Amino acid sequence: MLGSIPGEANCLGPEASRGSLIILSVAGDTPGVGRVRCAKNRRIPALGQARTPHGGGVSILVRDGAGVEVGVLEKEVPERATVTRRFSADVNLIIASAYFPRKADVSSEALDTLLGANGAMVIGADVNSHHVLWDPLRPSDDKGECIVDWCVQNDMKIANTGLATRRQPGTAALSSPDITLCRDCEISNWKSALSPDSDHHWITFDVFVGTSLDVIAPSKPVRALYSWNKARWNEFRKLSDVLIFRGMKRSAKGADALNEAVTRGIRMAAKRTIPKGKGVAPPFWTPELTKLDKMVQECKNERKRDALIRWRRKVLVDTAMGRWKENVLKLSTTDSASWNLVKSIYAPRPLTSPVLVVDGHPLTKRQQAQALAKMYMARSTKAPHAPEMRILSTRRSTFRPITEAELDVALRELSSGTAPGDDEIHCEELKELGRVAKKCVLRLFNCGLRTGLLPAKWKHGIIVPLLKPNKPASNMASFRPVTLTSTLCKLMERIVARRVRDCVEDKLQPQQAGFRPARSTVDTLMQVTSAVRRRRDGEKTAAVFIDYARAFESVDHNCIVKALMSFGVEKHLVT
């Protein structure tokens, strides 16, 4: 473990009370792999120190002097000291420390002086600057922006996790002026703790040198999915009956309250009776990406979040390229795995959905959502003759409630394995509901049909833009929106659609084949073929094919309601 430990006065004497230390102790582990451990030992000799007569800076201490080379102390700004630890003939670790005084300028030229020879390197520095990537407690400044740009250009990774590294004397204000950088090595378990001797904190972390990323287990928290084959369905039915009935008994009247009781009961029953799997860890994920992912999720400032996302994307690309280079070096004409890799690269496969790009710049998630929403709203049209439909509540004497038989048919038609909506209710759970729970669901559906008011949460959906095959990602029109809505809502839609279909089926033209049971495009082709063959000698046959652009997006809903009511569909079915 390597530790950058600010302000250990007992090691260097009283004059170093405001300094920073890097303590290095070596333990033999895997041959050819260097692993460094941190230890607090008052007998460790100081090999180099970057500091000014007024204090500050970083010091390097090594407990075991075997295989250690000490560089020349440079007193120009930034003051810097270097120590090289040689683990073997091929595995080295360069430890550089630096100090930028508060009033000193931070530039790319000054930062370049910290770069040593190629290979694994760790830099611990008191930079007296701030950026959201290592100091979310203070606003970013120009010095911090310069350091981030320099890190990107030189493939340096920032190991800080956002914890404070300094407590202001007097005011106890927290900040992070100390930064830990690494190159060609992996840092994990970066921690910061209060020091009893200084206003700077102790900083400790693990460094992996001379090992590939395969040694470090992926630590990204994967989303665990339900293991439906291991579900205890008998317990689920009994528990869902009790929880849903109890929730409905206690809830207020109205579709929203009934929907909340049903969804809450299903979720609670599933949590107790359906286990979750471990999930599959994503490739190329490292502890640094886990840290960045957590920082992105917790960051509330949109500007800072965008900066974190850009940095996370850069780190992911670098990690993937490093893994790819390792795989390329292992390729062999006699290795079957190498040929499988080549086949997988050249195998035809559909395009994935990349990051939405506009004017050559990738958009953030919020910008993507706003741009797509604006485009889809502009496409939506309204017919000038469409009436403003105001459908009142249906009288109980004319209302035909949904029956349990209709619900069972709709449940059997639900597709398993589909993504749930925002309420996290799955089709598999609805299919296994008990008899009491089904009656509660029927009560919810009939309440919505009778009053014309559906739960407000059913109108919320998760829109996922999918890139159309062979379309450019730079054009927003290349994306097809797919909306994940409530599974309960889709279940009720199936029941209503069946009733509407039964009412209008005999009123539709026989030539229409789309969206009708027991019909397909083959029927239309047969009709066209028959018309061509029936022509007499000398007669010509003309055909007109019309393709409406964005037909589903431009259909006015009020016109659909008007047409359905003209077919005699009941009012409560078109609310």
Image: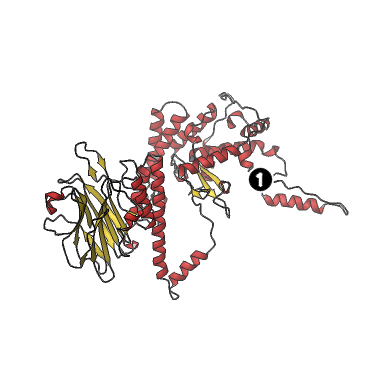
Q: Is 369 left or right of 125, judged from the image as shown?
A: right
Residue 180, given in percent of the width and then of the height, sits at 28, 53
Q: Is 344 left or right of 507, judged from the image as shown?
A: left
Q: Residue at x 38, y 43 (%)?
A: 304
Q: Which residue is mark 1?
A: 514
Q: Quarter holding the C terminus?
A: top right
Q: Amino acid at mark 1?
A: Gly
Residue 79, by quadrant, is bottom left
Q: Closest to the observer: 286 or 39?
A: 39
Q: Closest to the observer: 86 or 309?
A: 86
Residue 240, given in percent of the width and then of the height, sits at 40, 39
Residue 565, given in percent of the width and then of the height, sits at 65, 30
Residue 212, given in percent of the width and then of the height, sits at 33, 64
Q: Is 335 left or right of 209, judged from the image as shown?
A: right
Can I make out residue 63 in this image?
A: yes
Q: Closest to the observer: 301 or 6?
A: 6
Number of numbered labels in the structure image = 1
Q: Residue at x 34, y 47 (%)?
A: 144
